[in-house]
Structures are given as structure tokens and as C-alpha cells.
Amino acid sequence: MKNTLTLLIVFFIYQIGFSQEQPKSLSLQEAIDFALENNRTAINATKDIEAAKQQKWETTASGLPQISAGINYQNAIKQQVTPVDLNGDGIDEDFVLGDPQNITATATLNQKIFDGSYLVGLQSAKVFLEISKNAKTKTDLEVRKSVIDAYGNVLLAEESIEILNRNIEVLEKNLFETNKIYENGLEEEESVEQLKITLSSVESQLNNTNRLKTLAYQMLNITIGLDLNSPIVLTDDLENLTTQNVNLNLLTVEENVENTIDFLIAENDKVSKELLVKLEKSKALPTLNAFINGGYAAYSDTFSFANSSQRWIGSSVFGVSLDIPIFSSGMRNAATQRAKINLEKAETELTETEQRIKLQIASAKSDYQFAIEDYQNKKENLALAERIETKNQTKFFEGIGSSFELRQAQTQLYSAQQELLQAMLDVINTKATLETALNTIILN
């Protein structure tokens, strides 16, 4: 009995531990890979490709043989009477023509032989599939950039909290020591107050950063496709990521505008407008269709169609129809001219897109180079600020420096710390922006 109770307790403890959601550990690359499969926007972009494939087949199938069948049953509640003068004496006799009940069953096969709009439709379906694939690539690039941004914001919050906690620890120690000196009459009350002001400010920043950290984790979860409050652990740190993302060779990469996704999308738009011109022109061409129809019909005074003795009359017909557009009062010409105008607009937009991409790449390279230079500068500034703060702290406790000078040095140090963290994040984000503009990332 005792062993059974022990086993039950162990079982329940195991069940409770197993039911708790385990944190998901993610490096930045793992977060990107996970997002490309689970981000809601990326999922819908994949579904758009599948829908485009189905539409392509739908268009293709519309030109293949089409078979339809139908059954028609009629029961004349009151039959039509036809008056006929049989004797030529002006006296009509009523005749009922046909049976009151009849049923017909037919099947028809239709086949396009020539239709210019169908041929254009096949080309359009192929282009639409290409548009969907390019849209998926653009979505994946944007998702990747969003993940990098969200991941970096979490790391920024985590690093900021760590630094703020260290600063608070130092300030509390300074405040304690200064307060003791003041109580012994060797320091002014203003020195204690100055440190209290600094401590209060840093504690307020810490509280705000803690709130921002929660929001940053939630934003990252949404971006990669997890539930809002799913627990995750980031395995990369800000400093290592920054070092990995310093790549000066990227600044000399050749600008191949024709291969960028925005240019390809603009080119897709131009091609689709060309097909619309072809479509409007094709409406002036004849269309040729063929059909074969076959069926059976039965007639009776009563509903005897299920009887084996019922007589069924078969029929079949083959036909070809040729539709020749002759005159549309200028409607087709106006539609063609409108399509040509839209094509000219698409060509202009393609040129505009090419110029905009070149400017975008140049701007992204400039921002990335500045981010790297600024990062190096902020590292040096932090080292200087730390030395200045240390000197002022020593001078203050030796009685040769004022509390105002110490507070100024501390404030300068705290600013330098945050500026370095932001500079690290800028290096990572501007590199992602440049890679997106260059379209150099190979996505799965």
C-alpha cells in the first residue's frame, strides 16, 4: 500500500511537470527558420502560391473537354388543346397533342477549338503563379527582417536590465557610504540628495525597461508565430551578434538591381499589363467551338418510366459554332487603348522602381557603414566614461570632488552604456536592411 501511494505521488508530480510548457530555446537563425514556417503572414503567402497553382489548372482545364448531363421531367397538369377544322364547315374539334408526361436525359460534350482569350489566359495563369512566388519571397525577406528587429529588441532590454541592476547596486553602495559620512558630519546633505536623485532615476528606468522587455518578448512571439505568452529563451547575446554582423565586404557587393525582389515584382506587373493588351486584342478574333449531344426521351400517359416495357427514343447531334465579332461601336478599340495606357504606366513604374532600388541600396550601405563606425565610437566613449566616473568617484570619497561632478560623471556613464547598446542593435538592424535591399539572402 505504501509503495502504491508513493508511485501515485510520483506519477502526479511527473504529470504536473510534464504539463507545464517548457521554454523554447532559440538562436537568431533558429528564430528566423522557425518564423519562415510558422509566421502567419508567411503561411498565407505559401497558401497564395498553392491557390495560384490551382488557378493555373482551372484556366488550363477550361479549354479541355467539358461534359455535362441533365434530366428533365415534365407532367402536364392540364394539357394544351389545339382546335382543328377537320370537315371545312367552320366547326373546330379539339385535339390534345402528345402525352401528358415525358422525361428526357441528355449528355453534352463541349470543346474549344480556337479562342484567343483562352491562349492569353494560359499565359496569365503562369504569370500569376510567378507573381505569387515573388510575393512569397518578399514576405519571407520582410519576416526575416522583422525577426531580427524583434530578437534584437529583446536582447537590448535584457542587456539594459543587467546594466541598470549593476548601476543600482553601485549607487546603493555609494549612497550608504555617503550617508554614513554625512552622519559623521564629514559630508554635506546635498551629496546624499544628489545620489538619491540619481538612484531614483535609474530605478525608474529599470522599471520601464522591465515593462518593455515583456512587450519585446510578446512581439518576438507574434513575429515567429508562437502564442503571445509562450516562454522562450534566447541563446545569442547582443555583443556576439554585433561582432558577427560587422561585414565590410557587404559594402562592396555589386548592385544587381534586376535580381532584387522589388524589381521582379514590378516586372511581373509590366508583363501582366502586356497580357491584358493581348487579351483585349484577342476579343476581335473569331471563336470556334464544337459539341456532341446525345440523349433519350420517353413519353407516357402515366409515370411508367421505370417499367422495362417503357419505350425510350434516342437522339444525338454534332455541331460546330463559329462566332465572328464584326462591329462593337468602338468598344473593343477603347478597351485596347485603355490596356495600352496601363502598360505604359507599368513601364514607367518599372523604371521608377529601378531608380528607387538603386537609391535604397546606396542609402542602406551608408546607414550600415555609419552604424559600424558609430559602434566603434560608442565603445571608445564608454571606456572613457567609465574611467571618468571612476576618477570622480575616487575624488568624491577622498573629499576633493563635489557630488555634482560625480552625478554628472555617472549620468554620462549611463548614457554611454545605453548608446553602446543601441549602436550594437543598429549594426544588426542596418545589416539586415542592406541584405534585404540587395536581396542577397537565400531563403528556404
Image (cartoon, rainbow, N blue to C red):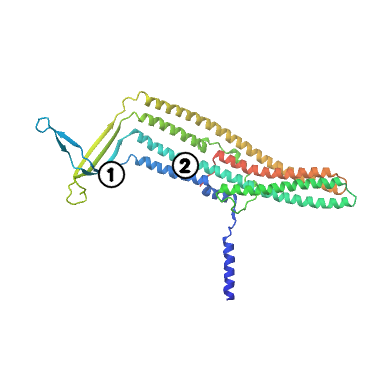
Dot 1 lies on which element? strand
Q: Is residue 95 visible?
A: yes
From the top left corner, tell me how far across and down residue 116 is, in percent.
34, 33
Q: Which mark is residue 163?
A: none
**Label 2 neighbourhood size at 10 Å, few (<14), some (14-19), many (20+)?**
some
- The amino acid type of the residue labelled 2 equals Lys
Instruction: Give the quarter of the image for residue 275.
Output: top left
Q: Residue at x 51, y 45 (%)?
A: 42
Left or right position of 126 against 107: right
Q: Residue furthest right?
A: 185
Q: Which residue is mark 2?
A: 133
Mark identifier at residue 69: 1
| Residue type of the residue flagged with mark 1 | Ala
- Could you tell me which secondary element the residue under label 2 belongs to? helix
Q: Quadrant of residue 19?
A: bottom right
The reply to whether residue 391 is visible in this rendering is no
In the image, 254 versus 424, the foreground residue is: 424
- Give how far apart the Cα atoms at labels 2 and 1 are: 38 Å
